[in-house]
Amino acid sequence: MVIGIPIMGSILMGSGSTSMIYGYVLGFDFMRCMGHSNVEVIHGAIFNKLPFLRYLIYTPTYHSLHHSDMGTNFCLFMPLFDAMWNTLNSNSWQLHNKITSNSGENGRVPDFVFLAHILDVMSAMHIAFVNRSFASISFSTRIFLLPFWPATLMILLMMWAWSKTFLLTFYNLRGRLYQTWVVPRFGFQYFLPFAADGINKKIEEAILKADRMGVKVISLAALNKNEALNGGGTLFVNKHPQLKVRVCHGNTLSAAVIVKEIPKDVKEVFLTGSTSKLGRAIALYLCRRHVRVLMLTSSTERFQKIQKEAPTDTQNYLVHVTKYQAAQNCKIWIAGKWITPWEQRWAPSGTHFHQFVVPPILASRRDCTYGDLAAMRLPEDVEGLGSCEYKLERGVVHACHAGGAVHQLEGWTHHEIGPIDVDRIDLVWEAALKHGFRPVFQP
């Protein structure tokens, strides 16, 4: 009857319409659901700045007081009428302000945080609070997403201007809470020189927030740990030496996954991105296994620097090459730098492409095989995992994510930042297996 009387009145007065009926019913239902949700969505600061709104919009706190003090707060939608008839609970605004001001303080503190970032507009729609069913499967570009692209772009641009780092997903592992936070920045922005300071500021704020909360380990994802951006996290640890939270790039496990995926009988590999953090570690590890590594780089100086880090008796296994043609007889390619379809033509038939480049290279050769980005399966006792991490299947996370989780489970107290310690690759790998993480490939 409460819904029906205004609708019938409007129709009898000749002002009824389909849009009026739908608008009123949906608006009524939204306000009713919000009022009974017991979750505050309107912060007290808004009412403090615009006091008149508190008489026009009711809140779950306002309505809950009606149930605890039945003689007050009768109005479902507009507290104005309670104020007019002197039935407004005097604690309404103070309690609402207290609840919204203290939001999160009594929440559960995560033990581990994986700090990710937005890749592009399409993948930004692959999140649970946008489309839960779509987020529960591996990401791929779908036609049904195209109509939402313009609106998503506008929202992301607004986030770029105003948003802070936000919580995306979470899961539980052995009584511990693991969360993924997102820096509201696109992948392409990490390559804009003028955007570097702003991005580092966002990452720093997230690290300091995690430190204040009591998080044990925060792992930097993908471009958030770019060497050129912040030295793989070194910038933040040097700036804040008192940090209790351990900052981790997780790349030691990423390197382990890649080198363990390479068959033991392989004698030669071709490596692009060979002077990067991961490329350097992979080259040094493989040369210790007496695997010949063709390192593609235009910098002789950087190659020689890496070569000198290798044991004397294995330095000859590192070979400097400057052209893709040098690998035309090598069937194991490790892509740490984007390889175009034109460059892929130099790979012989039957080549397998391992990769740690973001985004992954295009699979342009039908006579070759392409591996996924380094990843590991979470332990079987993981709980509450309702979404997929980008193009990986549910229950599989990128190796740097797993590396940070292992860091937390092991209780290691050092920061994993800067260059990868090649001596720890096998140690981290064994620790991951011990805790139930499993490789996606079959070693």
Image (tube, helix red, strand yellow):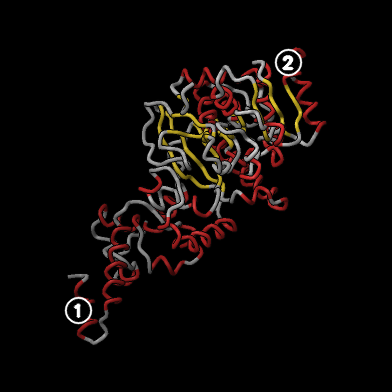
**What x and y, as percent, mark residue 179?**
47, 38
Element class at badge 1: helix
**Residue type for callout 1:** Met
Q: Nearer the viewer, residue 394 or 300?
A: 300
Query: What mark, if any, has residue 8 been given in the picture?
Result: 1
Residue placed furthest toward the right? 301
For the N terminus, give its image quadrant. Answer: bottom left
> Which badge, 1 or 2, is on the more N-terminal residue?
1
How far apart, in angstroms, are the residues tagged by discs 1 and 2? 88 Å
**What x and y, as percent, mark residue 98?**
44, 51
Q: Are marks 1 and 2 in contact (CB under 8 Å)?
A: no
Q: Residues within 10 Å of mark 1 (few under 14, many from 20)?
A: some
Residue placed furthest toward the top? 313
Left or right: 92 with respect to 412? left
The answer to whether one can see residue 260 in this image is yes
**What x and y, as percent, mark residue 431?**
51, 19
The part of the image, by quadrant, that contains residue 42 is bottom left
Element class at badge 2: helix
Count of all numbered marks drawn on residues in the image: 2
Left or right: 334 with respect to 30? right
Left or right: 368 with respect to 329? left
- Seen at 40% across and 46% down, the residue is 135
From the image, state whether disc 1 or disc 2 is nearer to you.
2
Query: What mark, if any, has residue 314 been given in the picture?
Result: 2
